[in-house]
């Protein structure tokens, strides 16, 4: 089965084409600056030089049409596909599934209506995810479309974990609660760690997705029991430009003294805070580390705060899990910054986690970075959200093709 995975953003479309079940990547790439006359198109085929071009691409339909064309064109070798109808299914990343979706589902008119309604909770993501779905439906009529939700991995959190201590009527009226994000990443990493542990599914795992956006999840079995991001991706860890946890009273105080509108406060918290706000330099951790090494005090402070908050959440989630068997670092910072991992891992001895400094600094790709005597395994695990989408797409489409009589009575779908 050939599965086309799409991640549609406000001005971009990222894609991968898989041969399943081998999970071989046949092609990948992205279209950036959609809506402009100099949109950037990058197309990659394993073993070949990337193909890059700038051209006018004004909407998502045109972008996906251009990608489909690239798949059937010969660039530095044979075309990836002879015909577009070789694509068997399309899997879409959808950021917010709310309380409606606890797993991945076949796209139907009702599913699209729900995604549209949930745009109120994810206005920067769901509308564009839906635009990608509708463009793919138009260009690939009759091909099954599957929605894979970022929030689904966290959807089974217990009520005491997902509810806020606000008047309960706000949850009943507006579904104000913790949803969590980065679900496909946390899920992939936790599954990979269970494999590395040789565990049948009972391991207590803390996954640390550390990038420009960052979150931590406490994972037991096949789902998280708590996660640091909340109603929006703003809550939790200090991030590149997002504040993470902040006293609401402090925010109200600043809004009153600075006469900030809601839009201005939102911009402050999401775009001008975090590592950028503390350092006054940049949101990119590589630049912050370089500045800290050169003696910049605000960069050093940003690094200290960043690692400290990660350690706090790890401690909290070890308590929530009643112990921890493994901690994994992933995403751009988690995979590539030995310094952040060291600043975090060197202070976890109370949990029985012993970092191996040499293994940590030498880590390239997937690696065990704890000592042989460590009671808690520490790992670096490169994430792969796209392969999770591809796997779920195959599972949903295959289930839909099963004869009705072959399905277990009452079995949950998606």
Image (cartoon, rainbow, N blue to C red):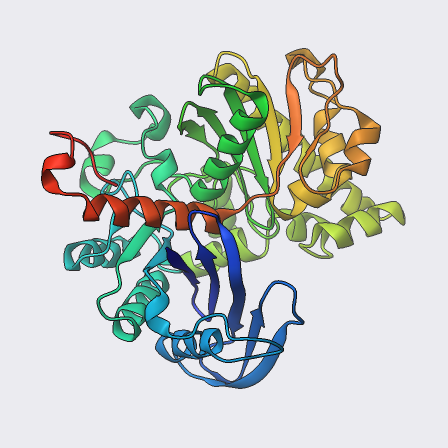
Q: Is residue 164 visible?
A: no
Count of labels shown? Answer: 0
Give x and y (percent) for residue 15: 47, 63
Give x and y (percent) for residue 223: 39, 29
Q: Is residue 282 left or right of residue 196?
A: right
Q: Residue at x 39, y 78 (%)?
A: 65
Q: Is residue 404 visible?
A: yes
Which is more toward the observer, 402 or 130?
A: 402
Q: Locate the C terminus by quadrant.
A: top left
Q: Residue at x 50, y 31 (%)?
A: 190
Q: Residue at x 68, y 47 (%)?
A: 278
Is 104 situated above or below 160? below
Q: Is residue 411 left or right of residue 132?
A: left
Is 134 situated above or below 343? below
Which is more toward the observer, 178 or 130?
A: 130
Q: Locate the N terminus by quadrant.
A: bottom left
Is 244 situated above or below 56? above
Q: Is residue 109 left or right of residue 178?
A: left
Give x and y (percent) for residue 291: 83, 51
Q: Residue furthest right?
A: 294
Q: Residue at x 78, y 38 (%)?
A: 339
Give x and y (percent) for residue 218: 48, 26
Q: Is residue 277 left or right of residue 269?
A: right
Is 334 situated above or below 143? above
């Amino acid at each position: 089965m050939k599965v086309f995975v799409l991640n549609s953003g406000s001005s971009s479309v990222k894609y991968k084409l898989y041969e399943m079940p081998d999970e071989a990547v046949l092609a990948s790439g992205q279209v950036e600056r959609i809506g402009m006359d100099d949109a950037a198109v990058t197309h990659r085929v394993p073993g070949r030089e990337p193909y890059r071009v700038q051209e006018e691409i004004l909407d998502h339909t045109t972008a996906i049409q251009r990608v489909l064309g690239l798949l059937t064109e010969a660039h530095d070798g044979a075309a990836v596909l002879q015909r577009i109808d070789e694509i068997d299914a399309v899997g879409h990343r959808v950021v917010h599934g709310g309380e409606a979706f606890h797993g991945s589902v076949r796209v139907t008119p009702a599913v699209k209506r729900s995604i549209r309604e949930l745009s109120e909770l994810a206005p920067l993501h769901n509308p564009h995810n839906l635009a990608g779905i509708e463009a793919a439906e138009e260009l690939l009529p009759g091909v099954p479309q599957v929605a894979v939700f970022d929030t689904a991995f966290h959807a089974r959190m217990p009520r005491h974990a997902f509810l806020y201590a606000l008047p309960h009527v706000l949850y009943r009226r507006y579904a104000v609660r913790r949803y969590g994000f980065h679900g496909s990443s946390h899920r992939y990493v936790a599954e990979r760690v269970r494999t590395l542990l040789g565990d049948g599914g009972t391991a207590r795992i803390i996954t640390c997705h550390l990038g420009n956006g960052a979150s931590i999840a406490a994972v037991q079995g096949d789902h998280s029991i708590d996660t640091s991001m909340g109603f929006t991706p703003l809550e939790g860890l200090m991030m590149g430009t997002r504040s993470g946890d902040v006293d609401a009273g402090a925010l109200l105080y600043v809004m009153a003294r600075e006469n900030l509108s809601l839009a201005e406060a939102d911009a402050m918290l999401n775009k001008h805070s975090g590592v950028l706000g503390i350092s006054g330099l940049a949101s990119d951790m590589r630049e912050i580390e370089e500045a800290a090494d050169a003696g910049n005090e605000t960069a050093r402070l940003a690094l200290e705060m960043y690692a400290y908050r990660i350690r706090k959440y790890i401690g909290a989630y070890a308590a929530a899990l009643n112990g921890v068997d493994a901690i994994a670092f992933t995403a751009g910072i988690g995979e590539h910054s030995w310094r952040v991992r060291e600043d975090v891992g060197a202070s976890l001895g109370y949990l029985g986690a012993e970092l191996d400094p040499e293994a940590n600094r030498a880590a390239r790709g997937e690696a065990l970075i704890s000592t042989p005597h460590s009671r808690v395994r520490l790992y670096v695990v490169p994430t792969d959200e796209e392969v999770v989408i591809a796997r779920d797409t195959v599972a949903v489409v295959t289930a839909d093709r099963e004869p009705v009589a072959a399905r277990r009575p009452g079995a949950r779908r998606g």
